[in-house]
Amino acid sequence: MKKIFLIITMAIILIGLIFVNYNSKSSKLISDIDQPKLVVAVVVDQMRFDYLNKFKSKYSNNGFNRLVREGFNLNNNHYNYVPTVTGPGHASVSTGSTPKTHGIAGNNWFDKKNQKYIYCTTDLDYDNLGGTAYSAKMSPKNLLVNTFADLNRLENNMKSKTISIAIKDRGSILMGGRNANAAYWFYGKDKGEWVSSKYYMSELPEWVTSFNNSESISRYLTDWNTLYDIDTYNESRVDENTFEKAFKGNLSVSFPYDLDKLKDLNDGYDMLKETPFGNNLTTDFVFSAIENEDLGVDNFTDVLPISYSSTDYIGHNFGVDSKETQDAYIRLDLEIERLLGYLDKNIGKNEYLLFLTADHGALKIPAYLNSIGVESKNVEDKELGVALNNILINEFGSDRLVSKIVNNQIYINDLAVNSLSLNYSQVQQKIINFLNELDFIDGVYTSEEIINGTYEDGYELLIQNGFNIQRSGDIIFKFRENVIKYGDRGTTHGSGYSYDTHVPLIFFGKNIVQGETQVRTKITDIAPTVVKLMGLNEMNTATGDVLDFVIQN
């Protein structure tokens, strides 16, 4: 009996030792990772993957080309959902999940319960800090899950810092997450200042006020001419054309642009957003943040999300193949060079981790595509919203049956359907029949089909990944390739085609292998990979994969 007791006791001790040893090894795997002092998340708004190579010969050696040369370049990185727009893009980069999970179903969506049109970061519960009474009433409350920056702060007992910066509020707020120390964005109009929300703090820090009070903002509104001789911009189309959207008060769409002269007709300092100099302003503000917030100086890894927003405004106005877009990226390349040089000097080479990606791409301007023999189309409101409304009036006698069309989704007005004692299925089917008859629409789906569907790949999977049960519409449709809904000049994005989904992804810096791959990766792979590089526990809500092959052993 004593022998049996001794054997059992020894077994328990042995199991206990194994358990302790296992846990100590697990802890060691996390704690022994040589964590970066600072994680810099760079998101370029509306950067197609092909811009890396298209303008390569015009880039410096130490901007985009340095990232590709010294970092790990993922050449086949795609968004794995629709709609491919700014809000969901930044939220997916930061959370490692799609709108299905993180809840940012678009830049805007319709709240059927409260019959309200929702902007992704508006929060009237918090007052503004700077700007106007409305401009900064923002917060990340609509983001349903944590970002990698949130996880970092939580696991470091809030001793790490997250300072997020972008011209666009949604770019800054949705990258910073729910536990950021601060998110800053730019308010133009007659002020020209960086603003925030009382969600983060009671008042702007002195260094932000000082930056805003300086006269330096005005100096960014200078003449915009090409950085190099325009005759060398062979990668883009002729400068003067009928495809691009001109600045107000300027009949021409060709260089140069006298920004100081045009600003009063183009919302004052907001005009900075539509020029490369908005990116210069962003970089300068980033440097002030690093210095004044003491980022990357202690034993707790800090996170600095940066979104360069101006390229999106320029891309919308002038298009993929314009001289303006080419010049914007040549100038942005110098901002990347400036950023890397600053980080090398102030944080230390191989002491920081940086990744660069984009929130979406863009379609070439439809009018331009048609001019070179590629069938394309820009859908006008009368072809969709107005025509649908007329059909419903003729059939059911009401113009209130559709509450909203947004993100290629139709929200049926349930209250109107019920109040008129109409059959919901009949209304739904009438809308579907109407959509299916349009030659620029390639597929129509009900919310039930998307929710219950089993899709392993294809466009339907992209719709499913982007569909949030609480926030998405009742009927979803997809445009044919090279079709957008926009104005008569310029272009946009939002589809699941490669021109919108294929974006750069480069990891650079601490613990990153030098190399490249053609393996297809997903935008949702970024956050889980960064979390591992930071030595944190896994993100429970992330749906992407860890890209182990970019990490040094």
Image (tube, helix red, strand yellow):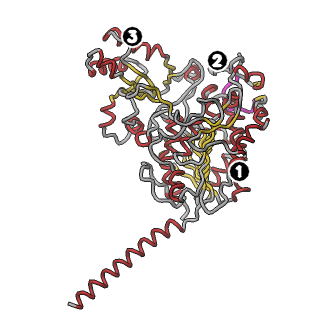
Camera-side residue of 513 and 293: 293
> In the rendered view of the protein, which quadrant contains the N terminus?
bottom left
The numbered mark, 3 or 1, whose residue comes first in the sequence reads 1
Magenta region includes residue 448: no
Drawn side of residue 245 relative to residue 87, left or right: right
Outermost residue toward the bottom in this view: 2
Q: Is residue 20 above or below residue 347?
A: below
Q: Tell me if residue 256 can be seen.
A: no
Residue 172 rendering spot, x and y as whole percentages: 59, 41
- Pointer 2: what residue? 242
- Pointer 3: what residue? 390
Camera-side residue of 531 and 20: 20
The numbered mark, 2 or 1, whose residue comes first in the sequence reads 2
Question: Where does the magenta region start and end?
Answer: 230-240
Q: Main secondary structure of the magenta part?
A: loop
Q: Nearer the viewer, mark 2 or mark 1?
A: 1
Disc 1 is placed on an element classified as: helix
Instruction: Report the disc number at residue 292.
Output: 1
Disc 2 is placed on an element classified as: loop
Task: Residue at 62% x, 20% y: name it.
Answer: 243
Drawn side of residue 300 relative to residue 459, left or right: right
Q: Amino acid at mark 1?
A: Asn
Q: Is residue 470 above or below residue 283?
A: above
Q: Quadrant of residue 182?
A: top right
Residue 14 rendering spot, x and y as whole percentages: 34, 81
Task: Residue at 71% x, 45% y: name it.
Answer: 206
Mark 2 burial class by Cα count in 10 Å: few <14, some 14-19, many 20+? some
Camera-side residue of 302 and 478: 302
Task: Residue at 31% x, 10% y: name it.
Answer: 395
Mark 3 burial class by Cα count in 10 Å: few <14, some 14-19, many 20+? some
Drawn side of residue 30 relative to residue 248, left or right: left
Q: Amino acid at mark 2?
A: Thr
